Image (cartoon, coloured by chain):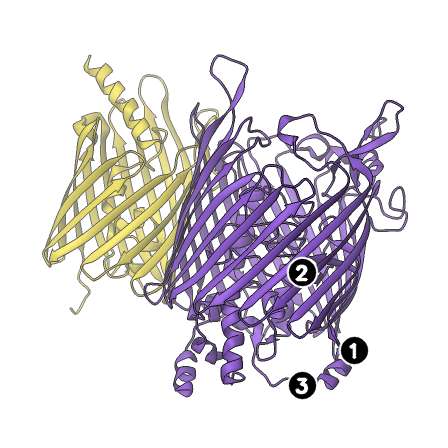
Chain colours: A yellow, B purple
Amino acid sequence: MKTKLTGFVALLCCCWQNTPAQTNTGSFIKDCTTTAAYSIHQPDIFSLLANPAALAQLPGSSAGIAGGRKFMLNSLAEYQLVAGMKTSTGNFATALYYAGGPAYNESQIALSYGRSLGTKADIGLTLQYNSVHVADGYGNASYLSAEAGCIFHLTSVLNTGISMSRPAGSKWGKDKSESTPSVYTVGIGYEVSRQFLITVSVQKEEKQPVRVNASLQYKPVPVLQIRAGINALTHSGWAGAGWSRGSMQFYVYSIFHPQLGITPLMALSFQFKKKGK
Amino acid sequence: MKQVIIGVVCMIQTGVICAQEIPAETEQQIESLLSQSENGTEDDQIIQGLEKYKRSPLNINIADASALRTLQVITDLQIDNLIAYRHLLGMLTSIYELQAVPSWDLYTIQRIRPFISVSISLPIRQEMESRFRKGEHMVLFKISQVLEKASGYRKDSTNAGYLGSPQQVVFRYRYQYKDLLQWGITGDKDAGESFLKGAQRMGFDFYSAHLFIRKAGPFSAIALGDYTVSLGQGLIQWQGMAFKKSAEITAIKRQSSVLRPYNSTGEFYFSRGAGFSLQAGKYECTTFFSFRKLNANRTLDSTENYSGISSLLSSGYNRTFREAADRHTVSQTMYGLAISRNTSRLKIGLNGIMYQYSLPFSEKEEPYQLYTIRGKKWFNASMDYSYTFRNIHLFGELAAAMNRSVAMVNGLLISVDPKADIAILHRRIGEKYQAVYGNAFTENTNPNNENGLFAGISLRPAAGWKLDAYTDLFRFPWLKYRVNGPSGGADYFVQVTRTPNKQVELYTRFSVQIKERNEMMMGTSLAAPEKIRVYNWLMHMNYQVNQALGIRTRVETKRFQKKYGEPEHGFLAFFDLRYKPLMTWYSAVIRLQYFETESYDARIYAYENDVLYSYSIPANSGRGYRYYVLLNADLNRSLSCWLRFSQSIFPEQHILGTQLDAIKGSNKSEINLQFLLKI
């Protein structure tokens, strides 16, 4: 019974995400942790998950880890590890992703590069190695994919960007009969002040309805940050609070879906201090 | 004070608008027009006009109302106020003084700036000599072709395919001195039409020639050859291109000179003959005569002779035996008279126009066609007016047709504040009313069978912010094509534009359109009008990254909702790169586009740059990718060339198009090459 229930909820999750189960475009970690992607003053290491060009604005070498369980189900757990390094020729990052459980899971290893083109534009590229594991006969399948993005700094407080993930699609599987769709994202961020950021992104995945995500980020006091957002497609909302101490930030989020319930999520990020400071 | 104003306005930013070939607002208007009418147009008069003024700016110190209207960028209220200002304070000393003119705001000046100048006028005698010596000769040659072979070009035994080659060829020669003297010739061969054989033994399928003179003695205009006639508010005649509902809220008034030269490649909306406008003080009298052979579908009588016209064909295509058989089969004689009295504030005009055909229009079978034009003759008459009082501009037209039906349009433009404009337009057009070349501000393509009220507001609440909104409520008292009963609908539109600096323009738009269309009634085979709702949301950005590089990106979604069945969705996103370094001889535009629509009803239109004087607004439907590359090179001071390659890729389709235009495969590619010589 429990297996059936889990299967049913997994099916609903696919509907909620409106993506095939084997893609991480509907990752709830990405939804919550990337609110600062279209920002100059408040970027963090997770921003590159929304647009690889956001890596260019990384203030220093950083690392982050996030994890949660969708609708409190073990078989729908999701984990993300990201680490980025700032260099004089651009910023590099690597990311590891895992979602699912023993019966079905997908994982990804990604390498990203982002750099600024002057003060007005940033570009970025991510190369991904994806693998899918299905128990009971199917086994493993893997494929390569790429995501490219750019962010334009229209003014000191207004930033916009686009990204394309797998623009030509990705065929995979035993007989290459399965495919991962292309995803196009356009986002805009408005930094009302150093404490308050509003971001709206529009995401189109092939053959799926348009997803519109709106989020805000507010820092009422230096040690506390509040984040919240909505997904117009699924009518679900989320909220989270972050606590800063030194170069470490710890966040707790909760996503609420009217039918499927609560998804808890935690994230921890650390920014390494520059030498001599 | 004057100097202060000039000093302040010297800081006017022109960035985003000047970086484009035509104003972004005009692009939006053209886009809106085509998505509403669903018909393509070959009328490039507006772009030609703007390009002309970019090269030879209109001197606003001497331009009269008629010349200012040809810009199609400013309203009649602004024109009247400018002329009144000149009368009161004399000539403008600088273009920046325009901000001191009532109802002229920074936004308007930014838009008009590339097309106007302020200079001292030359004596009229010198002008007359200059007309023949100082004008510009222009020769244009354009060739374009769809690279994939359509089924119409495959030879078979039935000879039902296209008779000619797949190239479209345009040739145009024009001499022009400002807007005072112009002559030229145009030749056009559409794709599939023959050249120097078959029905086109004289070479091109379509030729057009014109001579147009303005301000010659008592004549304010003389038109010989091909020209357009535009009267009043378009209820009885408007042959030029005219915009309808768009983000330009105040562009609700039809404004143009009665006579204008014609040298586009469109083969229907123009007159051929002679027209004269005579000015005597405040009075202007225009008379015109036209005789043309038109393409028409004809009906046969019981003796197998052609007895009537079932429809006039406006496409101009003569590509197959069947189309060639309808070529130039009906003659049309048109003549008319327009008399107007113009003062700085008030204009009243009387217009009459008569049409005669070699064959009568046949009676139509469909109920919705009950009131269409019949017989060999048709007549329309109208009275039009406009009046400016302070910041209020009233205008309208009352028209009648030969079948004793009437129509009227009345509008109001108010500049309630330097930061706010209001536009209201009411129309009441009877179901019996018909006009051959009518083109008024209506929801329908032609002005008939429509009552409606349009109300819009344009707000500029703070620097860099603009809000445009309108609502349009309309009723159609009689049946329409695909609407088996009286029907109605509404349009709601709001657009917010943000221009934070001279490099950036962002706008977002939301619109809802409610109309009725036949749907099959549940459980029956009867079709009855049911409401359809179309929701549209768009985000657009223009960004001039530096002096050489500009980007443009758009995301648009659409939801088409019928009463029965699931809603159909559409999505389109594009990304443009425009590279044009200053003082260099080359430029390039590249677009990458993705679109996905669930049906043709959910199709989305997007404006595309094309070779000079051309534009492309394809209807994107299905799922696919589209890209184009446009290269421009100014080879020397006289010779320029353009090359454009575009391709649409539909991964899931194996046949594109239908009937003779059907292409095997998933790709459709088109190449355009254009040369322009200016001496």
**Residue A18: image location, x then y, percent:** 35, 31
Residue A124 in sight here: no
Where residue B545 sits, quadrant-wise, is: bottom left
Residue hosting label 3 = B122
Residue at image coords 32%, 38%: A108
Q: CA distance from mark 1 to mark 3?
A: 15 Å
Q: Residue at x 47, y 79 (%)?
A: B96
Is residue A182 shown left or right of residue A31?
right
Amino acid type shown at disc 3: Leu
- Please report whichever mark, 1 or 2, sits nearer to the chain's N-terminal start: 1
Q: Are marks 3 and 2 in contact (CB under 8 Å)?
A: no
The C terminus of chain A: image quadrant: bottom left
Mark 2 residue crowding within 10 angstroms, few (<14) / some (14–19) / many (20+): many
Where residue B528 is drawn, which disc sits there? none
Q: Are marks 3 and 2 on the same chain?
A: yes
Say which residue label 2 marks: B642
Tell me the number on the disc at residue B132: 1
Above or below, comparing residue B242 to residue B474 in the picture: below
Q: Secondary structure at mark 3?
A: loop
Q: Secondary structure at mark 1?
A: helix
Q: Amino acid at mark 1?
A: Phe
Marks 1, 2 in one chain? yes
